[in-house]
Image (tube, grey):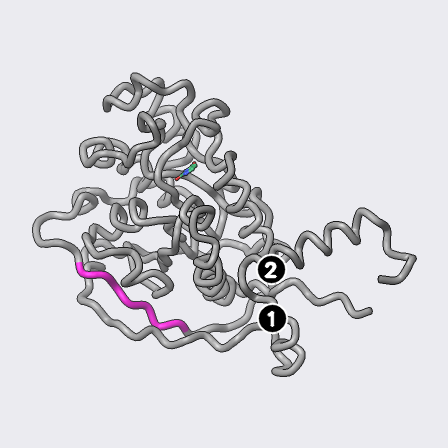
Amino acid sequence: MPASIPESLQQKIEERLRYYEDLGIQLFYRDRVAAGHSSPALPQSTSRITAEESSLSKPKSKIALPASAAPVPQQVEPVVVAPPSGPSLFDAMDKVIDDSLPKIREDLGDCTRCKLHKGRHKLVFGDGSATAQLVFVGEGPGADEDAQGLPFVGRAGKLLTQMIEAMGLQRKDVYICNVVKCRPPQNRAPEPDEVETCSPYLLRQIDAINPKVIVCLGAVAAKTLLQTTRGISHFRGEWQQWRGYKLMATYHPAYLLRNPPAKADVWKDLQKVMAELGLQLPKKKSS
Ligand code: URA
């Protein structure tokens, strides 16, 4: 490393390289140089499942890309997950015109609509850009989130932040929220009645933001939005069409903390998201 690089920058570069190694992509730079392009070819989606979208899709307007994003035209063929039989949780929900995040937060108020309110310290509404092209949806707040009133600020949150930064974005460029807004006791999975009570607010948040891509972090988010009982490992990494949005399910950062080898799968999924958003991988520093 030349002496002219400040130590703080050198540390940052080393941290970033260690993180890419953590993700299992130590061959990445070599591949890039050899192939002469910035990202590996997208694998084709292999499964096509019956559509739920006809009555649920909605027209979408385009929002400006963040400054760091250079558009790259990309054809990605969406696939959809079959809904269970019976009415969808979201069937009755049309897009509310002129909805906004402050209005949704105001409607939630000091919510007591489900039993989760009894144990919460702070309601965790969501955080980030109201015009984000990319929305991450997690499961529900943990202890740190409950204490701070912000999503993904604990250990799993730090990993999510690293993932976002590896995509060339910052947390403020995206929007992060959860299926349920209050911490389930002992971090148990939210129960069906809690999900049903809270998810209309999630749906409104997503519609108010109108992102280009939704990333579901973990099975609870994926199963809630897609209304499927299929295991996430069967459809993670495949584009889904959901209410007119492109949706990608991937593993939850908390799962990655327990199972680091799965980081490589998540990185592959996030690279597809980057391609869809026209995001470039950070450039290699030439020595
Ligand atoms: N896990 C989640 O699903 N959401 C959070 O906000 C934090 C941890």
**In which quadrant of this rendering is ligand 1 seen?**
top left
Check the picture and name the quadrant holding the N terminus: bottom right
Label 2 and label 1: CA atoms lie apart by 8 Å
Q: Residue at x 43, y 52 (%)?
A: 259
The disc labelled 2 sits on which kind of residue?
Tyr
Which residue matches tag 1? 28
Report whether 188 appears left or right of 84. right
Task: Please report the bounds of the magenta region as a residue range.
Answer: 76-82
Whether residue 47 appears in magenta in the rendering, the answer is no
Q: Write down the quadrant of residue 56 in the picture.
A: bottom left
Determine contact: label 2, label 1, CB under 8 Å.
yes
Amino acid found under the numbered disc labelled 1: Phe
Q: Residues within 10 Å of mark 1 (few under 14, many from 20)?
A: some
Q: Which mark is residue 223?
A: none
Image quadrant assignment for residue 42: bottom left
Q: Give the residue pinned by disc 2.
A: 20
Quarter of the image with the C terminus is bottom right
Residue 31 as seen in the image, left or right of residue 148: right
Left or right of 60 in this view: 24: right
From the viewer's perspective, tell me whether residue 286 is left or right of residue 223.
Answer: right
Please name the residue shown 40% across and 24% down the image: 123
